[in-house]
């Protein structure tokens, strides 16, 4: 009996200590009072600021956390193409999230279905999102079954979508952001799904909602940390940042997955591919000899010999058909090439920043009225943006122009000599070089040339290296280029 009382007393004491400890932690992080003024947080009676302690954003659907770090960006094998466009350089990438697999056909069909259902009065919106299925055609090859079936036949639902341009992929990322955030508000019982009312420009858009330009079908207002019911604000930490294409540096860093070779800040060995070794077959006993990716093994050999077809896929393969890398990402080599965010320049690695390197920034601001209020939305229900003006940038030190896709590449800051007149292409989206006799030198490179990486089902092993890079106009598509989405991590995990 005495023992039972002792145990009961001990439990009560632990509970008291636990509550006291929690209260101290609560005060430590300033959830009750400001550490600088003593004013109470989340107190509507004295106008106290609302404060929510959030360490970091959560991963959106389909995303895997990629812890940031430093790595050597660029080629890890001989430059047999002689392009010299991926010179090695050490950079650092911040933590971010990335899709586990490429975007699939079923994902794109969901997108098309939503566009057709919502933009009833704007059918051209869904039409613009249609993949180019004719990319499968070959003048001297028979691929008509793929033209007709690859996108819509259910047997191909888990295959990566192709025939999608960089511009279409970017639009998909915007759409996905809004659908994920809308569903989060529905799950929190802030909004209700309203298929009938959310048509044309009345559909949910994250930025329009946060700026008060969208109300929607309200289930109940969010109370936040105070007692006042209101719409959700960005400061509540509930909504996710934008889905987007990964930058080239992010994609390459994620593809190498060097966490498997790292210990105490030492990288034991670099990688040619997203796996160890200079070979493309699995060396584990259970799977020994199996191909690590879907690619063209040799001229005329796309899948191996009947009866032991290895890698076994003539065209693309379903996502997750091969082994993931050390980050848990599938098909970072082979299957399909993947669009990344960057504008292509051969010497980008020499110009870009050491931290989060990227070429392609266009700095914009929302369209507002004379009082600074956001007032304009387009026919898709999105906030309108415009490039920042020279007047707005007059006193800036960190950047002086809005469109930086062509920065330090053909403008006055990178003039080669006095005998060559470089015309800045900032207004026209390209750089054109004129000699003294006005003879024009043409190039395929302009501000619409976008990088794609990773190798595909019809590429040789050379292109499976994450350091490889090629480019295509952002309006064009191919039967060997797909994409996956990324998301910046806000905060620290």
Image (spheres, rainbow, N blue to C red):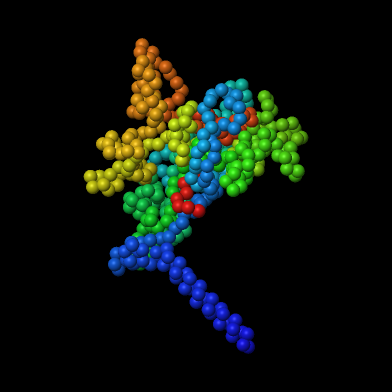
Q: Which residue is drawn at 35% across and 17% down?
A: 418
Q: Which residue is drawn at 40% across and 58% down?
A: 236
| Residue 454 sits in quarter | top right
In this rendering, position of residue 175 left or right of residue 310: left
Q: Residue at x 39, y 64 (%)?
A: 30
Which residue in the rendered view is the most extreme toward the left? 370
In the rendered image, residue 289, in percent from the top left (x then y), is placed at: 74, 37
In the rendered image, residue 322, in percent from the top left (x then y), is placed at: 65, 41
| Residue 3 sits in quarter | bottom right
In this rendered view, identify the residue nearer to me: 276 or 120. Answer: 276
| Residue 35 sits in quarter | bottom left
Q: Can residue 235 be seen in this snapshot?
A: yes
In this rendered view, identify the residue nearer to me: 92 or 164. Answer: 92
Total labels drawn:
0
In the rendered image, residue 346, in percent from the top left (x then y), is placed at: 48, 27
In this rendering, position of residue 325 left or right of residue 388: right
Depicted 342 relative to depicted 224: above or below: above
Q: Which residue is drawn at 43% across and 26% down?
A: 446
In this rendered view, identify the residue nearer to me: 368 or 161. Answer: 368
In this rendered view, identify the residue nearer to me: 475 or 331. Answer: 331
Depicted 30 relative to depicted 362: above or below: below
In the rendered image, residue 315, in percent from the top left (x then y), is placed at: 63, 33
- Quadrant for the N terminus in the image: bottom right
Depicted 401 relative to depicted 376: above or below: above
In this rendering, position of residue 320 left or right of residue 67: right
């Amino acid at each position: 009996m005495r023992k039972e009382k002792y145990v009961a007393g001990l439990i009560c004491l632990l509970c008291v200590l636990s509550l006291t400890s929690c209260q101290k932690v609560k005060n430590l992080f300033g959830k009750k009072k400001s550490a600088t003024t003593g004013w109470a947080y989340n107190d509507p009676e004295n106008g106290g600021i609302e404060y929510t302690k959030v360490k970091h954003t959560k991963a959106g659907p389909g995303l895997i956390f990629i812890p940031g770090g430093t790595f050597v960006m660029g080629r890890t094998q001989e430059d047999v193409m002689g392009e010299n466009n991926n010179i090695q350089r050490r950079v650092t990438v911040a933590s971010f999230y990335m899709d586990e697999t490429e975007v699939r056909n079923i994902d794109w069909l969901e997108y098309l279905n939503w566009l057709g259902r919502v933009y009833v009065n704007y059918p051209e919106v869904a039409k613009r999102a249609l993949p180019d299925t004719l990319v499968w055609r070959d003048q001297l090859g028979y691929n008509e079954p793929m033209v007709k079936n690859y996108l819509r036949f259910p047997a191909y639902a888990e295959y990566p979508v192709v025939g999608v341009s960089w511009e279409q992929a970017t639009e998909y990322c915007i759409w996905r952001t809004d659908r994920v955030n809308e569903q989060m508000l529905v799950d929190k019982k802030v909004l209700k799904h309203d298929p009938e009312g959310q048509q044309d420009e009345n559909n949910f858009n994250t930025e329009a909602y946060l700026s008060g330009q969208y109300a929607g079908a309200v289930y109940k207002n969010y109370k936040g940390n105070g007692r006042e019911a209101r719409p959700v604000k960005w400061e509540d930490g509930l909504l996710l940042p934008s889905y987007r294409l990964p930058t080239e540096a992010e994609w390459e860093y994620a593809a190498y997955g060097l966490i498997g070779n790292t210990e105490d800040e030492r990288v034991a060995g670099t990688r040619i591919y997203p796996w160890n070794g200079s070979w493309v077959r699995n060396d584990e006993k259970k799977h020994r000899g199996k191909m690590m990716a879907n690619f063209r093994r040799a001229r005329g050999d796309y899948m191996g010999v009947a009866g032991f077809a290895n890698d076994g896929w003539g065209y693309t393969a379903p996502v997750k058909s091969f082994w993931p890398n050390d980050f848990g990402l599938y098909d970072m080599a082979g299957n399909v090439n993947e669009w990344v965010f960057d504008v292509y320049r051969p010497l980008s690695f020499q110009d870009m920043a050491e931290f989060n390197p990227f070429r392609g920034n266009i700095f914009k601001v929302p369209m507002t009225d004379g009082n600074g209020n956001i007032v304009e939305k387009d026919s898709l229900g999105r906030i309108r943006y415009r490039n920042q003006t020279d007047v707005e940038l007059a006193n800036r030190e960190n950047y002086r122009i809005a469109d930086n896709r062509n920065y330090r590449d053909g403008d006055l800051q990178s003039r080669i000599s006095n005998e060559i007149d470089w015309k800045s292409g900032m207004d026209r989206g390209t750089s054109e070089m004129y000699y003294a006799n006005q003879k024009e030198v043409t190039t395929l490179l302009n501000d619409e040339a976008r990088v794609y990486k990773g190798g595909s089902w019809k590429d040789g092993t050379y292109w499976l290296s994450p350091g490889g890079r090629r480019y295509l106009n952002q309006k064009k598509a191919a039967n060997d280029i797909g994409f996956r989405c990324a998301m910046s991590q806000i905060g620290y995990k």
